[in-house]
Amino acid sequence: MKSAEMLMLAAERLVDIAQCQPEVKTNERLLLYRRRRKLTAKQVYDATGIGANRLSALESGKSEVTAPEVRLLAEAYWRAETDLLDVDDRERLYLEVEDE
């Protein structure tokens, strides 16, 4: 099996884990779902307007994702918004939306 095929299988397995395990953090989910779609940062930018530096900050866990970013990324990754968020971020974003 080629290394690219092995990486793809590993990424698919991690996505399945992210869907089932709430302890998988939001930043890890964002990276996994982007890799699953085989999207570059440039392609994400073209689809969402989220720049490469911001995307890197989100995927590395250096920044918290906002509700508008979740909507854009979920659409680009063909996922439900809740698939992209861990339990803590679901609660945080829900409270932010309620306060508006």
Image (cartoon, helix red, strand yellow):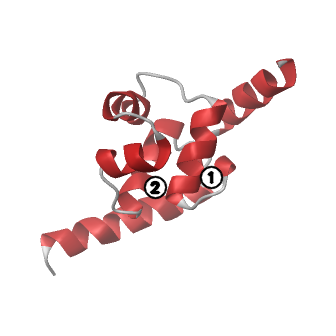
Task: Tell me, for residue 37, which label it has, or none.
Answer: none
Residue tagged 1: 83
For the point 23% across and 75% down, which residue is it? 5
- Label 2 sits on a secondary structure element that is helix
Report whether 86 appears left or right of 54: right
- Label 1 sits on a secondary structure element that is helix
Report whether 27 appears left or right of 8: right
For the point 35% across and 52% down, which residue is it? 43
Q: Residue furthest bottom?
A: 1
- Indicate which disc, 1 or 2, sits on the residue closer to the N terminus: 2
For the point 57% across and 44% down, which residue is it? 72
Q: CA distance from mark 1 to mark 2?
A: 9 Å
Residue 6 in view, yes or no: yes
Report whether 10 appears left or right of 24: left
For the point 53% across and 46% down, which residue is it? 73
Name above or below for residue 12 compared with residue 92: below
In the picture, residue 75 is in which quadrant?
A: bottom right
Percent x, y of residue 88: 66, 30
Asked if marks 1 and 2 touch (Cβ < 8 Å), the reply is yes
Q: Residue furthest right?
A: 98
Task: Check disc 1: other Cα within 10 Å, few if <14, some if 14-19, many if 20+.
Answer: some
Name above or below for residue 39 compared with residue 96: below
Task: Tell me, for residue 33, which label it has, or none.
Answer: 2
Quadrant location, the N terminus: bottom left
- As shown in the figure, which amino acid type bears the numbered disc 2? Tyr
